[in-house]
Image (tube, helix red, strand yellow):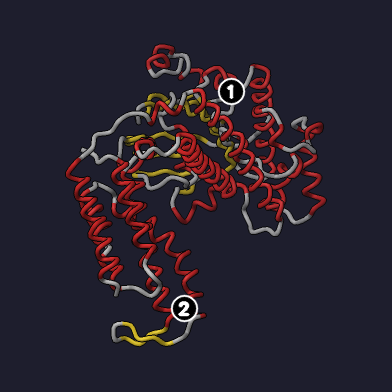
């Protein structure tokens, strides 16, 4: 069973230089997989393709066993959570509590259930002190954790995280890893932070200049320091 | 060689003033003025489809506004031997004016970069403060667009069914405003740090032939405006 499958995937913006050139790889279910690539190599573009925000592409691309095409995009989005690199983009409710509750409200009309599920998550992620604050006033690390809690409350099957460790200090990164480790869902972590990936992920896929460079268990892939250096990852 | 943006700016302003100065209900004379945008599209290497798309999008709003003019002014008139209503004639006249002025402006905006337009305004002795304000406003427009796209993507991912909860809409608007404001402040600071005036102080080449053509166009439009009012 695959979470994400790409076969001979080719994509370019307006027919210009190819971002992906017949790239093929598979990301398995129930694993935390990192998509590693240097800046500008198409990490976020891949996520946008997967969620149907960019089109068209050539080849085959599927998410949660559904081919990414017009008829399936809504279903894919309903079952996949996405953490934006800039979490401000996705936090738009007046309080942290309301923002985390939003996803649950979409799936459950019973207010008591929504309140309970949201409070459970708030406790689970240790956000009780922040629950009545405006999300815009939180630190970047706190915003990311609130956004992750909101995604989990949406009852999604898989989560895609775009550079979750960027611009965070060591303490916030540690907190982020603790939070993400506790989540048992299919997870794609888009990053170029090798240390973060080593501590969190099971598998890794490396792409550069439109081509697949390596794929496999994190320990095997990230042990090849020459390859990482060659592709600008260390 | 690219035409000096100042020449194009003068021609554009003259063209718009002449078009706008036509009295209500004039149609045939206005049609002559299509020559200028058609000439510009032919001479400048611009994506015509892009211009037409931008024009079509804004046309929807204009058509909605002109529908009122047609409905509320039902008095019958004879125009060039055709019996019609005053409202319909006025609406057609206004719509042609809109098409001519907006298409020419879009061609101008798509022909030059923002900095070239700023250079053009500077050679026309428009005060630096005003040019700087316009540039910052344009950057703000881009910021709003960027933020709106991100919010729209987040909405597509987070809002899975139609809801009556108005706090979502208010929250999104507040977020759009706050983020644009914060980023806009940073952009303004960065601009100040980089001394923006020196960017639009460069001289651009003056193409005499195109200048003459623009003057000929403007003169012939003035001639049509005052001699053939049909």
* Residue at figure coordinates x 36%, y 34% from the top left: A19
Q: Are marks 1 and 2 in contact (CB under 8 Å)?
A: no
Q: Quadrant of the N terminus of chain B?
A: top left
The percent coordinates of residue A67 (x first, y second) are: 45, 48
Residue with the most extreme left position: B209
* Residue at figure coordinates x 77%, y 44% from the top left: A117
Residue with the most extreme top position: A226
Looking at the image, residue B168 lies above or below residue B84: above
Total number of numbered labels? 2
For disc 1, the chain is: A
Q: Quadrant of residue A82?
A: top right
The percent coordinates of residue A225 (x first, y second) are: 43, 12
Return the mark for residue A133.
none
Q: Quadrant of the C terminus of chain B?
A: bottom left
Compared across the picture, whether A130 is left or right of B212 comes to right
Q: Which residue is mark 1?
A: A167
Under circle 2, the secondary element is helix
Residue with the most extreme front position: B226
* Residue at figure coordinates x 70%, y 55% from the top left: B166
Measure the alpha-carbon separation of dots 1 and 2.
Answer: 58 Å
Residue A162 appears in the picture as rendered: yes
Q: Which residue is mark 2?
A: B70
In front: mark 1 or mark 2?
Answer: 2
């Amino acid at each position: 069973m695959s979470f994400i499958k790409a076969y001979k995937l080719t994509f370019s913006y307006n027919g210009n230089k190819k971002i992906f050139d017949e790239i093929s790889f598979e990301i398995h279910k129930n694993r935390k997989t990192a998509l590693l690539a240097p800046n500008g190599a198409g990490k976020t573009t891949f996520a946008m393709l997967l969620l149907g925000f960019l089109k068209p592409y050539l080849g085959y691309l599927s998410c949660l066993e559904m081919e990414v095409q017009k008829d399936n995009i809504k279903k894919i989005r309903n079952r996949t959570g996405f953490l934006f690199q800039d979490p401000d983009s996705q936090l738009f409710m007046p309080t942290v509590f309301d923002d985390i509750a939003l996803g649950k409200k979409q799936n459950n009309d019973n207010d008591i259930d929504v309140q309970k599920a949201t409070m459970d998550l708030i406790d689970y992620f240790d956000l009780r002190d922040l629950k009545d604050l405006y999300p815009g006033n939180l630190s970047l690390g706190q915003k990311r954790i609130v956004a992750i809690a909101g995604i989990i409350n949406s009852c999604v099957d898989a989560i895609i995280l775009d550079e979750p460790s960027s611009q965070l200090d060591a303490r916030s990164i540690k907190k982020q890893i603790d939070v993400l480790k506790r989540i048992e869902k299919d997870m794609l972590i888009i990053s170029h932070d090798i240390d973060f990936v080593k501590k969190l992920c099971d598998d890794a896929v490396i792409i550069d200049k439109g081509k697949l460079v390596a794929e496999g268990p994190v320990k095997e892939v990230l042990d090849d320091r020459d390859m990482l250096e060659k592709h600008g990852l260390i | 060689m690219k035409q000096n943006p100042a020449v194009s700016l003068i021609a554009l302003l003259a063209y718009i003033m002449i078009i706008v100065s036509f009295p209500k209900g004039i149609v045939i004379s206005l049609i002559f003025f299509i020559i200028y945008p058609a000439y510009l599209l032919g001479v400048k290497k611009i994506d015509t489809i892009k211009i037409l798309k931008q024009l079509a999008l804004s046309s929807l709003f204009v058509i909605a506004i002109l529908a009122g003019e047609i409905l509320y002014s039902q008095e019958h008139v004879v125009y060039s031997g055709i019996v019609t209503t005053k409202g319909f004639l006025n609406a057609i006249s206004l719509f042609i004016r809109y098409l001519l002025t907006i298409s020419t402006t879009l061609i101008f905006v798509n022909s030059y970069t923002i900095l070239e337009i700023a250079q053009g305004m500077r050679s026309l002795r428009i005060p630096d403060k005003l040019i700087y304000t316009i540039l910052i406003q344009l950057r703000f427009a881009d910021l709003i667009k960027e933020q709106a796209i991100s919010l729209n993507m987040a909405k597509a991912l987070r809002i899975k069914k139609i809801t009556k909860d108005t706090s979502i809409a208010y929250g999104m608007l507040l977020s759009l405003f706050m983020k644009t404001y914060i980023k806009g402040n940073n952009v303004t600071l960065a601009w100040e740090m980089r001394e923006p005036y020196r960017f639009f102080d460069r001289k651009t080449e003056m193409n005499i032939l195109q200048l003459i053509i623009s003057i000929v166009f403007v003169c012939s439009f003035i001639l049509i405006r005052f001699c053939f009012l049909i």
